[in-house]
Structure formats: structure tokens, C-alpha cells
Image (cartoon, grey):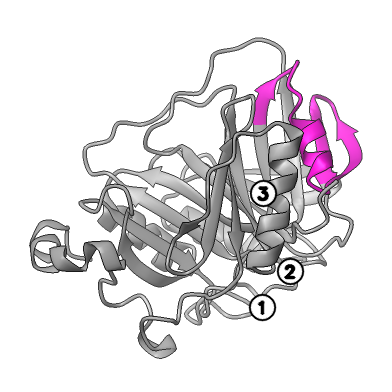
Amino acid sequence: MINDILGIHHITSIASDPIKNNHFSTEVLGLRRVKKTVNFDNPSVYHLYFADPKGTPGTVFTYFPFPSRIRGTRGIGEVAQARFAVLPGRLDFWEDRLAQYGVSDLLRVERFATETLEFTGPDGERLAICETNGASLPPADGHIPAQEALRGFHSAEFCVDASSEVGDLLTFMGFVTQTREGETQRFELPSIGPASIIDVHYKAGGEKAQENAGSVHHIAFAVKDDEAQQRVRQALIAYGCQVTGVKDRSYFKAIYFRTQDGILFEVATNPPGFAIDEPLETMGERLCLPEQHKSLRDRLERQLIPL
């Protein structure tokens, strides 16, 4: 069993309009844009990182905005919902705020004895905010009062076929089986720290998810450093996963593999962080490019939609 997973590092989704996505993430949710860069594999597309003011792992929500993308279809074999944490008693504030901004599909529910506000983002992505005493991560950007602000991720929910073995994989990765509500099984890291919960919704039958705008592209799990990442990589290979080599993503190092359900998992190092190529005070304002794409700056600055 793996003992190095610390929790969710980041969640990356696909968007359509980068301006609308940037406004929703910063102005509506109150996250700070901590990095404006490009997709490593497709530099004509932004990679936007939103988080707490320092880009703390566990608070980082990122997007690939493709202006021409249509909406994806929700279904089996995807990360179906990303959930943020807030302090207890804060959902009234968020329900009023989201309603004022015209956010759709607002729904107050109780999940696993946790008060939860579900809603959809601008591309139909399923999101939620959960009240929790464990909201120990730093608050998001300062234009929302700290007591009300999002405190990083609370959890994520997978939607998989009823026959899925993803629960066994999560157990191997160090998650502990908790309670079950109907078709949804909760898994939680034993440290019970922030961003440490995965809920798996086992669905009997149904259409497979079709990835596009509004879909989660991948979920990343955090490890302490390069050595921990190597231990995780070797353990996953021994378990039978097809794991990539280590990829330098400038702000962390990453390895990737897919579950049998088709969900893309990443394991990312916490260091070096987002302040390695620009000052913390102005982080996220200028376009930062990875080394292999720096020669494209003039073209990309003309081509990319200004934010």
C-alpha cells in the first residue's frame, strides 16, 4: 500500500471561453489567478491556475480554455464533481452570492452529514461547496472576507460503473473506506487533512461521459517531494498501472496514469510551487512560458485572447 499521498493537489478542467472562465473563477468564486501560462502539449491554449493567494496545493483549480469547444456530456468514467470547503455556517453567504451572479442549478443538500451547496459553472461543470470544521487551508483571494472565502478543496466525486474496481485502487493509494450513502462510497486518507476525500458513485448502467468543455480533464494527488513521487510510481507500476515517466511541469513534477474507468490520475510534487518564475505579489498577471515555448512568446501574446 502507498503511504505518500497527501490529498488532492489540483483538479484540471476543460473550459470554452477563457474570459468567462477567468471571471467566474476570480470574481465569482474569489480565487486568485496564480499563474497564466500555456498548455505544455498545445501552447496555443492557455493553462490558467486559480487558487489561494500563494497557490497552496489542495486549493488549486486549473483550466484549459479551448474557445471552440462544445459542452461535454456527463456520465460514467469521469470526475463528476469538484467540491470546495468553507467554514461552518457559510453556505447562506454563498447561496446569495451565486444567485446574484446568475449561477444556475443551485441546490442545498446534505451529503454524508455535511451541508452542501451544489451548482454548475459556466460550461456546465458540476461544482459544490461544503461546510466543514476541517477547512484548514488558507482562505482564497482577499476580495471576499476570509471567514466566508473558499478554503481549497473539500473532496471530489467520481462516477463509475457499478463493476468498477477504482475503490481497490484508492485503497492501495492509502485511502480508507468510510461510510456509504446509497450508491456512493466515501474514501478518505487516514490523516483526515484538507482535500483528503474521494466519493465514488457506482452507477449501474448509463452512458459513458464524453469529455469536452465542462469536463474534468484530470485530478492530481499531492506528494511531498521527488523521492515520494518515485516511490509512488514504482508501487503503481507493480500494482499494474501504466504510469508515465516524470514530466517537469515547471511548478511541480508530474506522473500520469488512467484508471480502468478511463479517469486520468496525476501524482504531483508539492515543490517548487508557483513563485519560481515571478514575484508572489504579481503572480498570475503576466504570461509565463515553459522553457520549450519561450521562443513563441511574440506569437502567443498576439494569438491568445487577452485576459
Query: Dot 3: within a 10 Å radius of its alpha carbon, few (fewer than 14), some, or many (20 or more) residues?
Result: many
Task: Measure how far apart labels 2 and 3 are at the Cα level.
Answer: 35 Å
- Tell me which segment is drawn in magenta: 159-187
Q: Which residue is mark 1?
A: 147
Tell me which numbered mark, 2 or 1, is placed earlier along the sequence.
2
Tell me which numbered mark, 2 or 3, is placed earlier along the sequence.
2
Q: In the image, which disc is placed on residue 179? A: none
Q: Which residue is mark 3?
A: 233
Give, as a three-letter code, the residue at label 3: Arg
Q: Position of residue 111 (x, y in %)?
A: 78, 42
Left or right of residue 242: residue 248: left
Left or right of residue 303: residue 182: right
Within the image, what quadrant is residue 268 found in?
A: bottom right
| Residue 9 sits above or below residue 116 on the image | below
Q: Position of residue 174 (x, y in %)?
A: 83, 49
Give, as a three-letter code, the residue at label 2: Leu
Left or right of residue 164: residue 243: left
Q: Secondary structure at mark 1?
A: loop
Query: Dot 2: within a 10 Å radius of its alpha carbon, few (fewer than 14), some, or many (20 or more) residues?
Result: many
Camera-nearest residue between 43 and 149:
43
Q: Which residue is mark 2?
A: 87
Judged by depth in the image, the label closer to the viewer, 3 or 1, is: 3
Q: At 78% from the left edge and 44% from the top edge, which residue is drawn?
A: 110
| Residue 103 sits above or below residue 164 on the image | below
Q: Secondary structure at mark 2?
A: loop
Task: Measure how far apart labels 3 and 1 are at the Cα level.
Answer: 38 Å
